[in-house]
Image (tube, rainbow, N blue to C red):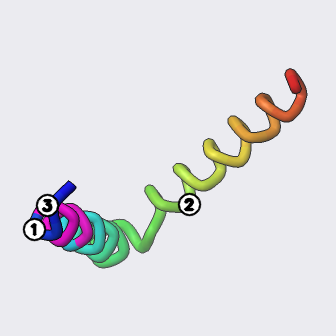
């Protein structure tokens, strides 16, 4: 991955997070964080 691609992806992620916080008060981030924790618990169970 080149520096330019990494920079574009980083700015895209930061922009989308900022947009979510501005439009939805971060509801999508909280939803995704809860789903990630649920996935981690599921994977820990099968370890």
**Within-10-Å neighbours for mark 1: few <14, some 14–19, many 20+:** few
Farthest top residue in view? 46
What's the residue at 16%, 69% (across, down)? 3
- Is most of the magenta stretch helix, strand or loop? helix
Please tell me whether mark 3 sits on a helix, a strand or a loop: helix
Farthest front residue in view? 2
What's the residue at 44%, 69% (across, down)? 26
Region rendered in magenta: 5-10
What's the residue at 13%, 66% (across, down)? 8
In front: label 2 or label 3: 3
Residue 20, horizontal then vertical, whole percent: 32, 67
Magenta residue check for 4: no
Residue 25, horizontal then vertical, whole percent: 42, 73
- The residues bearing labels 1 and 3 have C-alpha atoms spaced at a distance of 4 Å
Tell me whether the residue at label 1 lies in contact with that at label 3, contact meaning CB atoms closer than 8 angstroms. yes
**Within-10-Å neighbours for mark 3: few <14, some 14–19, many 20+:** few
Q: Is residue 2 above or below residue 23?
A: above
Q: Please give the residue where the numbered disc 3 appears in the rendered image.
A: 5
Residue 15, horizontal then vertical, whole percent: 22, 72
User: Which disc number belongs to residue 37?
Assistant: none
Q: Please give the residue where the numbered disc 2 appears in the rendered image.
A: 30
């Amino acid at each position: 991955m080149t520096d330019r691609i990494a920079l574009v992806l980083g700015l895209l992620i930061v922009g989308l997070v900022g947009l979510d916080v501005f439009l939805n008060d971060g509801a999508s981030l909280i939803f995704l964080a809860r789903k990630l924790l649920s996935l981690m618990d599921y994977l820990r169970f099968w370890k």
